[in-house]
Image (tube, helix red, strand yellow):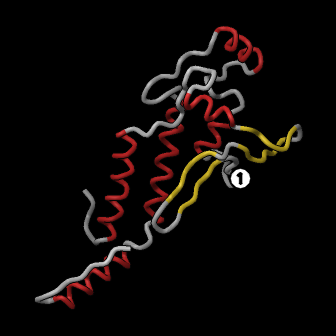
Amino acid sequence: MVRVRVEGGSSETAQRRVQQLTERYSDQSEALREVGEYIRGVILQGFEAQGMPDQWKPLSPGYKAWKERIAPGRRILHLTMALKTAAAGLDGENNAGNITRIGKLKAEFGVNARFPVQDHRREWTDLHYALKHQVGIGVHPRPWLQVTQEMIDGANAIVKRWALTQAGRKPR
């Protein structure tokens, strides 16, 4: 909790202004939703580019040959599409595996490692390979989620634009 105390001069006017600003910024969910959309877009770009900012290591020849027989033309980390779908929230209303929790002052984004699927052959899918590829457990690291300075700057720009709009100022 932030407490502000103003003394002297026109302290009542200043206190009123501080109270107005506190009320105005007490629900940032609109900006946080936009940040979430931005982050999901960056993640999706990373899947499409097969790594961002750095390209993922190529598949081993044996796995690549097996994968081409099973799912011809599928890119790295696109075999079942479950991780990409979950990470980028591409499953519409279902959002299977995607974690998006937006509150008034905080937001959480991520991937649930185990989630129900609409598939008659199985009830659950397991995204254990999300961590396996992210950090390189038994495989070359293929980090599908990297928080870069560009991502931080993009999120900050969204929040700044929202804050300026809330303050009645025109964002640049």
Q: Amino acid at mark 1?
A: Asn
| Residue at (50, 35) in percent of width and height | 45
- Give the side of residue 155 with respect to residue 134, left or right: left
Question: In the picture, residue 74 is in which quadrant?
Answer: top right
Q: Is residue 128 above or below residue 70?
A: below
The spot of residue 104 in percent (x, y) is 48, 68
Secondary structure, mark 1, is loop
| Residue placed most toward the observer, 117 or 134 | 134
| Residue at (62, 30) in percent of width and height | 132
- Give the side of residue 24 with respect to residue 48, left or right: left
Q: Is residue 87 above or below residue 1?
A: above
Instruction: Looking at this view, name the residue that lies furthest to the top.
Output: 61
The spot of residue 63 in percent (x, y) is 69, 14
| Residue at (54, 38) in percent of width and height | 44
Label 1, residues with CA under 10 Å away: few <14, some 14-19, many ≥20: few
Question: In the picture, residue 117 is in which quadrant?
Answer: top right
The spot of residue 27 in percent (x, y) is 44, 71
Instruction: Looking at this view, name the residue that lies furthest to the right.
Output: 120
Residue, disc 1: 94
The spot of residue 52 in percent (x, y) is 46, 30
| Residue placed most toward the observer, 102 or 163 | 102
Which image quarter is the N terminus in? bottom left
| Residue at (63, 48) in percent of width and height | 98
Q: Is residue 101 above or below residue 21?
A: above
Question: In the picture, residue 80 is in which quadrant?
Answer: top right
